[in-house]
């Protein structure tokens, strides 16, 4: 039937109200939009615009990944570092341009794919497109929440708050599956979400701050994005206005479907960070492994400290058997590791501020709660969305710093997030729920589709990427 765009409806009808066996579309949303439709004026920006690649392969694609990454079987802490370097080597030929020559990044030419139902963004209260929503036009990035500066402890604290600007790309092997799920753009099939072995998804993340205000960014690449500044978002009294701002990519989060390396979950999550002290010749070559995670260490899930023998000691947790953290990674990454020092990246918002638990304990001020991890968060991906990304009794996940009700660490309820499940078993166990194979972005794309058809029951909050 040809490529994905040929299988979908023609571009001529993308903006109309279409009856699809449900109610007619409740609002006019372009599921194939590259971005949110906001562009800078010529005197603000003279560069090219990144166009989303939504032309998914019509047939399965083998990316050549060797199951197990050459480590010989299930991952261990002894083999995790070699595995991390093997994954980075796998994506280097096609992905390094986004760091080393971002002005010429072209996902279509590189063989990386964006997600449908994710570009257009949403209208604000005034009916005008919210400039923080959807993908912006310069790098095709999403925008996350504003993070407090004290997320990072001295001597690594930045001068002010940070905000994440991230791109999310699926390789050809992963994208062929997306083509099956969204083969009919107006009737997606979540039950078909099951990534092939070797599928890779990459999230590259940048912050709009000069290295003079945060030295860990020294010698990073520079992206340009079209978003409201942090200052605007915090203090503006009128409508927000996008502006061209510089952002510096310093984190990459990668997941790869590899049931040999991770037989219980099927997934290996990896973090890479920019090392300002690296002697690498280019920004890409200055990325080093932060860590690797292939399970939630469920045997330690009922320990209030997550298995960390001394939670007051900010160091690597030797009790974990399914997370490896690079002891040679830059020091700033320790501040933002997840619960019990499980893997989480600096921009992953795994550490929460202003938390209240059922026992009455409150985490405020400098008493932060490490509340999540790569696998525990993505393991909550299901449709309909009925379980929080964090170990919480409700679906609401507020911006960091706002009051957040979480279960008590180590409790039976808390431990549900830190189990090992294959990607076709939903975490909630609710009747009718469909697991989405550890993919959070697909969950939000399905939410956008349901918003378009007026099915508010299945609509989730805005996609704050992290």
Image (cartoon, grey):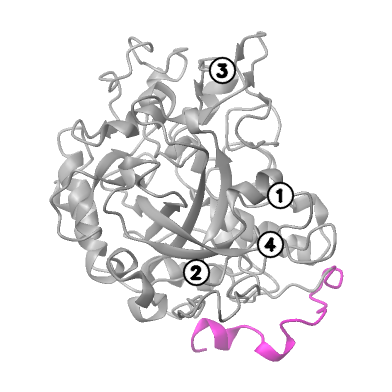
Residue depth check, mark 3 versus mark 4: number of the one nearer the observer: 4
Q: Is residue 307 above or below residue 255?
A: above
Disc on res. 114 = 2
Disc on res. 365 = 3
Residue 110 drawn in magenta: no
User: Could you give the CA–CA distance between mark 3 and mark 2, rounded to whole angstroms?
Assistant: 38 Å
Residue 5 drawn in magenta: yes
User: Could you give the CA–CA distance between mark 1 and mark 2, rounded to whole angstroms?
Assistant: 20 Å
Q: Are marks 3 and 2 in contact (CB under 8 Å)?
A: no
Residue 341 lies left or right of residue 231; in this view the side is left
Q: Is residue 346 above or below residue 109?
A: above
SS label for mark 1: loop
Label located before the other in sequence (3 or 2): 2
Residue 35 lies left or right of residue 251; in this view the side is right
User: Could you give the CA–CA distance between mark 1 and mark 3, rounded to whole angstroms?
Assistant: 29 Å
- For mark 4, what is the residue? 241
Q: Residues within 10 Å of mark 2 (few under 14, many from 20)?
A: many
Q: Position of residue 224 (x, y in %)?
A: 46, 65
Q: Position of residue 270 (x, y in %)?
A: 32, 45
Q: Residues within 10 Å of mark 4 (few under 14, many from 20)?
A: some
Give the residues in magenta.
1-26
Q: Quadrant of residue 344?
A: top left
- For mark 1, what is the residue? 460
* Residue 241 showing in the rendered view: yes
Q: Is residue 404 above or below residue 424?
A: above
Label located before the other in sequence (4 or 1): 4
Q: Are marks 3 and 4 in contact (CB under 8 Å)?
A: no
């Amino acid at each position: 039937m040809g490529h994905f765009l040929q299988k979908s409806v023609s571009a001529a009808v993308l903006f109309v109200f279409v009856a699809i066996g449900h109610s007619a579309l409740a609002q006019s949303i372009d599921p194939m939009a590259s971005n949110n439709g906001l562009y800078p004026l010529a005197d603000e920006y003279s560069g090219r615009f990144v166009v989303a690649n939504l032309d998914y392969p019509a047939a399965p694609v083998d990316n050549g990944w060797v199951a197990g990454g050459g480590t010989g079987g299930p991952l261990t802490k002894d083999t995790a570092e070699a595995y991390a370097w093997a994954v980075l080597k796998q994506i280097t030929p096609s992905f390094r341009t986004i760091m080393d020559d971002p002005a010429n990044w072209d996902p279509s030419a590189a063989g990386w794919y964006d997600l449908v139902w994710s570009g257009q963004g949403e209208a604000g209260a005034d009916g005008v497109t919210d400039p923080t929503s959807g993908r912006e036009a310069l790098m095709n990035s999403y925008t996350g929440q504003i993070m407090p500066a004290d997320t990072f402890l001295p001597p690594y604290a930045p001068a002010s708050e940070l905000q994440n600007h991230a791109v999310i790309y699926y390789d050809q092997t992963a994208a062929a599956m997306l083509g099956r799920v969204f083969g009919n753009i107006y009737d997606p099939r979540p039950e078909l979400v099951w990534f092939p072995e070797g599928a890779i998804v990459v999230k590259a993340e940048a912050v709009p701050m000069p290295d003079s205000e945060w030295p860990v960014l020294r010698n990073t690449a520079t992206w340009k994005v079209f978003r409201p500044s942090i200052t605007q978002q915090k203090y503006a009294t009128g409508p927000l206005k996008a502006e061209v701002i510089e952002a510096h990519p310093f984190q990459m989060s990668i997941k790869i479907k590899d049931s040999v390396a991770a037989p219980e979950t099927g997934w290996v999550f990896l973090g890479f960070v920019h090392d300002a002290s690296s002697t690498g010749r280019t920004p890409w070559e200055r990325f080093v492994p932060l860590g690797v995670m292939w399970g939630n260490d469920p045997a330690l899930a009922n320990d209030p400290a997550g298995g960390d023998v001394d939670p007051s000691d900010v160091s690597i947790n030797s009790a974990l058997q399914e997370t490896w953290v690079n002891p040679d990674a830059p020091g700033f990454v320790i501040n933002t590791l997840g619960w019990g020092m499980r893997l989480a990246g600096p921009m992953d918002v795994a550490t929460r501020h202003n938390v209240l638990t059922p026992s009455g304990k409150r985490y405020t001020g400098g008493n932060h709660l490490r509340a999540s991890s790569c696998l525990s968060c993505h393991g909550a991906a299901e449709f309909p969305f009925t379980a929080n990304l964090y170990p919480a009794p409700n679906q609401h996940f507020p911006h960091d710093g706002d009051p957040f009700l979480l279960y008590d660490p180590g409790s039976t309820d808390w431990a549900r997030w830190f189990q090992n499940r294959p990607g076709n078993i939903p975490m909630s166990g609710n009747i009718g729920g469909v697991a989405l194979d550890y993919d959070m972005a697909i969950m939000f794309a399905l939410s956008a589709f349901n918003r378009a058809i007026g099915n508010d029951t299945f609509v989730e909050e805005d996609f704050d990427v992290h």
